[in-house]
Amino acid sequence: MRQAHVTSLSPISSGDAELVQRAIARDEAAIRAIMQANNRRLFRLARGILRNDNEAEDVVQDAYVRAFTHLDQFRGDSSLSTWLSRIAINEALGRVRSRRSSVEWSELPKGTLEAQIIQFPLSSTDDPEKSMAQREIQHVVEHAIDELPEAFRLVFI
């Protein structure tokens, strides 16, 4: 059961605060819960920027390493998932920058990277046909995103 406690960090939920504190204390269950709740989102963000599944997986791992080594710096100004998303985006963009310096990210309009993250609907395990259709749609969307020019793709992601 969730405990409600009042803190000065209003945007952070009590669940996030509790998970962060437990993870800082090296509670494996809390770390696992954070990762399970955010794996999909972080992978999709990284995959959208890099267009490569393997590199996206590496970015997610690097983002978790960076996040968990600096978890004490999480202030709660945003949700934990938003904080982790920013780390993953920065990791992915860092890889893009090191690969190719021809795109100048600073030329993107202000607020481009502050967009709302919309979750792709979860697959239904009850209906295999619906689950298959969702996977197909997901592949079509990924392919369409991959075809966008980098600056537009980044804005879309």
Image: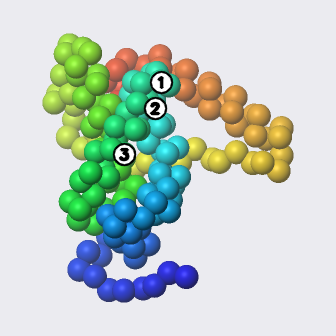
Q: Indicate the quadrant where residue 26 lies.
A: bottom left
Q: Which residue is mark 1?
A: 54
Q: Name above or below for residue 142 compared with residue 99.
A: below
Q: Which mark is residue 57?
A: 2
Image coordinates of residue 19 in percent, x first then y, are 41, 67
Kindly state the secondary structure of the residue where label 3 is placed. Answer: helix
Q: Which mark is residue 64?
A: 3
Distance in Å between CA atoms under marks 3 and 2: 11 Å
User: Disc 1 residue type?
Assistant: Asn
Image coordinates of residue 29 in percent, x first then y, are 50, 62
Kindly state the secondary structure of the residue where label 2 is placed. Answer: helix
Q: Which residue occupies 75% across, 48% down?
A: 124
Image coordinates of residue 11 in percent, x first then y, are 32, 70
Q: Residues within 10 Å of mark 2 (few under 14, many from 20)?
A: some
Name the quarter where the C terminus is drawn: top left
Kindly state the secondary structure of the residue where label 1 is placed. Answer: helix
Q: Residues within 10 Å of mark 1 (few under 14, many from 20)?
A: few
- Residue situated in front as seen by the camera: 65 or 12: 65
Question: Could one spot residue 115 in this view of the protein?
Answer: no
Q: Are marks 3 and 2 in contact (CB under 8 Å)?
A: no
Q: Are marks 1 and 2 in contact (CB under 8 Å)?
A: yes
Q: Which residue occupies 82% across, 50% down?
A: 126
User: Disc 3 residue type?
Assistant: Tyr
In the image, taking residue 86 as reference, residue 142 lies left or right, namely right
User: Disc 2 residue type?
Assistant: Glu
Distance in Å between CA atoms under marks 1 and 3: 16 Å
Distance in Å between CA atoms under marks 1 and 2: 5 Å
**Dot 3 or dot 2, earlier in sequence:** 2
Q: Residues within 10 Å of mark 3 (few under 14, many from 20)?
A: many
